[in-house]
Image (cartoon, rainbow, N blue to C red):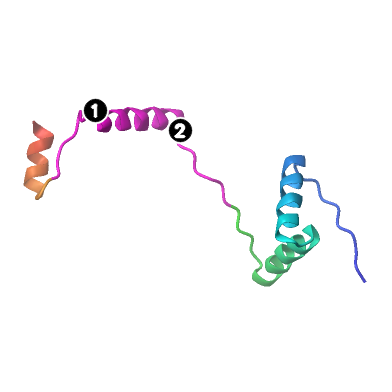
Amino acid sequence: MKTVLNVKIDPKLKKESQKTAKEAGIPLSLVVNSALRRFVANRSVLISVPLKPSKWLQKVLKETEKDLKEGKNIEGPFCSVEEFMKGLKS
């Protein structure tokens, strides 16, 4: 016997999930059942959020990429700590 599970999800996620399951040739219910079985067996759930740099860090990274392309503000490589420290002080 089967039962129905009603859950609220983002409409975009639902459409993308349905499309992906269809492309894989499997029903979306199989994906949900598999995830729930894994949850029960492991008694854990993996939630990941892609890391996104802060606006400040994004700005710094862009400036660094620009400097690298232009060959500006580049030091090294250093073969020793002493060389590194000398470079820092200059």
- Image position of 56 (left or right of 12): left
**Residue that lies at the very extreme toward the right in this rendered image:** 1
Q: Position of residue 26 (x, y in %)?
A: 76, 62
Give the class, few, some or many, for how many residues have Cα within 10 Å of label 1's Cα (few <14, many ≥20): few
All told, the count of numbered labels is: 2
Q: Position of residue 13 (x, y in %)?
A: 72, 45
Residue 87 versus residue 48 in the image, above or below: above
Residue sitting at x 89%, y 59%: 4
Name the residue carrying label 1. Answer: 70
Q: Which structural element holds mark 2? A: loop
Amino acid type at circle 1 is: Glu
- Image position of 83 (left or right of 4): left
Residue 86 versus residue 60 in the image, above or below: below
Q: Position of residue 7 (x, y in %)?
A: 82, 50
Image depth: mark 1 or mark 2 in front: 1
Residue sitting at x 57%, y 51%: 48
Amino acid type at circle 2 is: Ser
Q: Is residue 64 magenta?
A: yes
For the residue pair 75 and 49, the one nearer the viewer reads as 75
Provide the residue span drawn in magenta: 48-77
- Image position of 35 (left or right of 67): right
Q: Position of residue 25 (x, y in %)?
A: 75, 61
Quarter containing the N terminus: bottom right
Name the residue carrying label 2. Answer: 54
Q: Earlier in the sequence, mark 1 or mark 2?
A: 2
- Image position of 7 (left or right of 74): right
Q: Tell me the tag on residue 5.
A: none
Give the class, few, some or many, for how many residues have Cα within 10 Å of label 2's Cα (few <14, many ≥20): few
Quarter containing the C terminus: top left
